[in-house]
Image (cartoon, helix red, strand yellow):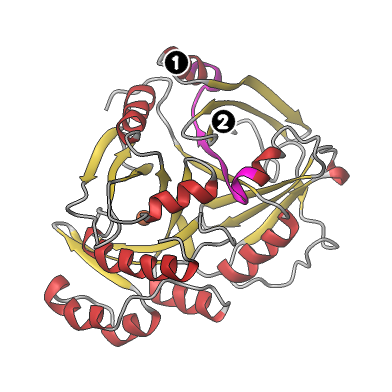
Amino acid sequence: MPTDAMTLKCIDHVRMFVGNARQSAYFYRNAFGFEVIAYGGLETGMKHEACYVLRQGQITFVLASPLSALHPEAHRLVRHGDGVQSIALEVDDVRAAFEVAVARGAQAASPPRTVEDEHGAIDLAEIHAYGDTTHTLLNRSRYQGVFAPGFKPLDADRYSPRTFHPVGLKAIDHIVANVEEGKMGDWVDYYSKIMGFSLLASFDDKDISTEYSALMSRVVADGRGRIKFPINEPAKSRRRSQIDEFLEYYGGPGVQHIALATGDIIASVRAMAANDVSFLKVPSAYYEMLPQRVGTIQEDLRELAELGILVDRDDEGYLLQIFTKPVEDRPTLFLEIIQRRGAQSFGKGNFKALFEAIEREQARRGTL
Ligand code: FE2
């Protein structure tokens, strides 16, 4: 595989811009089993925002809230509600990566800079992606602190360091974008041209359509297949598709869902359900047809049906997955929990059952 300055090492973190980071941190900790590891705010020298860093396995979420209307990104909250602001990607040389990205047509959001404290230095820069989502390019190889300059380990007064209950989530499997009708190809080109990603899979409205809803999707991935970004656009359908609903309530393109991998989906989902996480449910008929569709699997079918976990098979194996309902009041961002047993695909066989479940929710919201 050829490497160049834009070769990505991993997704370093996902930064979400939210209305009340303190309360969101409580939600992600107590519902999804994240540990709150660091805080940045007035007490640590941040003037415009409060940030909580959450960690589970290799997953890092940063929840940020503006402290006043003077925050340069404060407008995001009115327009989008809570949502993903940036997907931060680790590179070897931030300046070189930024220059290459811009030379290949990426729009600069903020030029390379180095932030330092007594624990070392982090280089970072930012480029625009779909909507007003950005990619932060960063290198933390010279940094030994808890997260980044401006952050301190969590103060016990802010969140008690009592034993939190991990849910067993291990890593980010993929992050999905919803973009406007007709724009999917442009964003596939963006990731191919600028980041050297290749097309992993393509779904058209024949794969993904129900009576009402239709969408098209293409999956791009980095050379090592570690970073996978499916990109959806709405397709013509009889009524408003879930992608149109997202675009309306998010106020434009943005991150639709983040899929988090677990090594034991039954244990993870059981723990989250006990923590009151709400999941999309498919009709019980789904499980009657499952043995014919996917053949022999290790898991107990009754347990999967009880929890609402979906299964799909491809040439390489099978996967188990489940989707939460939106994690905020707007019908926008949600999470997926996924366990791969060989399969490297995305659950195409579940799309129809799943979209019908989403449409039942849309009908309840009066947005179908
Ligand atoms: Fe997904």
Residue 18 % position (x, y):
67, 50
Q: Is residue 364 above or below residue 120?
A: below
Q: Residue at x 64, y 61 (%)?
A: 35
Q: Amino acid at mark 2?
A: Leu
Q: Which residue is mark 1?
A: 100
Q: Is residue 62 visible?
A: yes
Relative placement, left or right, of 186 versus 247 is: left
CB within 8 Å, label 2 to label 1: no
Residue 219 % position (x, y):
29, 42
Q: Nearer the viewer, residue 14 or 213?
A: 213
Q: Residue at x 50, y 73 (%)?
A: 278
Relative placement, left or right, of 112 versus 341 is: right
Whether disc 1's CB lies below 8 Å from ligand 1 is answered no
Relative placement, left or right, of 174 versus 127 is: left
Q: Is residue 323 above or below residue 78?
A: below
In the rendered structure, find residue 138 and report the number of the disc placed on it.
2
Image quadrant where residue 154 sits: bottom right
Q: Is residue 172 visible?
A: no
Ligand 1 is found in the corner quadrant, namely bottom left
Q: Residue at x 66, y 21 (%)?
A: 113
Q: Which quadrant of the figure contains the N terminus? A: top left
Relative placement, left or right, of 150 versus 189 is: right
- The answer to which of marks 2 and 1 sits earlier in the sequence is 1
Q: Is residue 345 above or below residue 29?
A: above
Q: Which residues are magenta?
A: 79-96
